[in-house]
Image: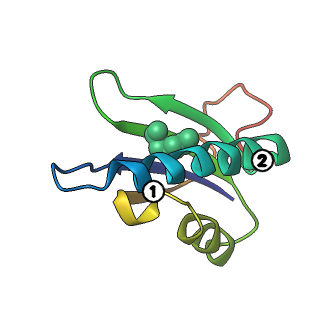
């Protein structure tokens, strides 16, 4: 099952940056692990914003939920999820 996930990272003036930087490093490692597994298929930075658009390929809604809840930066994020399905005009083999 494919999902578009948009993640906004929110850093405020009172954010403890030492804690944030620790979580950011953990987030990078977690993201790399999921990308290598194929579950986190794509990640793109939205230009000019601390936001990404990602594509996840998971077995179920529950699996995606668990993966997102475990994001080390989750406490600093606003997350939006959009379920995707194959477009009938797609010529790609890996769209479903
Ligand atoms: O930087 C971000 O967009 C937030 C998050 C997602 C992956 C990662 O390494 O950090």
Q: Is residue 66 left or right of residue 38?
A: left
Instruction: Classify 91 as above or below 52.
Output: above
Residue furthest left as drawn: 13
Q: Nearer the viewer, residue 84 or 81?
A: 81
Q: Nearer the viewer, residue 37 or 74?
A: 74
Q: Nearer the viewer, mark 1 or mark 2?
A: 2
- Tell me the residue at 15%/49% (across/down): 13
Residue 83 percent coordinates (x, y): 52, 58
Q: Which residue is mark 2?
A: 33
Residue 31 percent coordinates (x, y): 66, 46
Secondary element under disc 1, as helix, strand or loop, is strand
Secondary element under disc 2, as helix, strand or loop, is helix
Q: Is residue 92 visible?
A: yes
Q: Is residue 12 left or right of residue 25?
A: left
Q: CA distance from mark 1 to mark 2?
A: 22 Å
Q: Which residue is mark 1?
A: 82
- Tell me the residue at 52%/54% (across/down): 23
Q: For disc 1, does the CB lie below 8 Å from ligand 1?
A: no
Snapshot quadrant of residue 41: top right
Dot 1 alpha-carbon crowd within 10 angstroms: few under 14, some 14 to 19, many 20 or more? few
């Amino acid at each position: 099952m494919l999902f578009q996930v948009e993640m906004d990272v929110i850093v405020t003036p009172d954010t403890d940056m030492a804690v944030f930087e620790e979580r950011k490093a953990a987030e990078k490692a977690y993201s790399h692990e999921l990308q290598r597994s194929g579950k986190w298929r794509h990640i793109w930075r939205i230009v000019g914003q601390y936001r990404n658009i990602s594509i996840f390929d998971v077995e179920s809604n529950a699996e995606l939920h668990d993966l997102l809840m475990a994001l080390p930066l989750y406490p600093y994020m606003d997350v939006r999820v959009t379920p995707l399905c194959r477009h009938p005009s797609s010529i790609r083999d890996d769209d479903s």
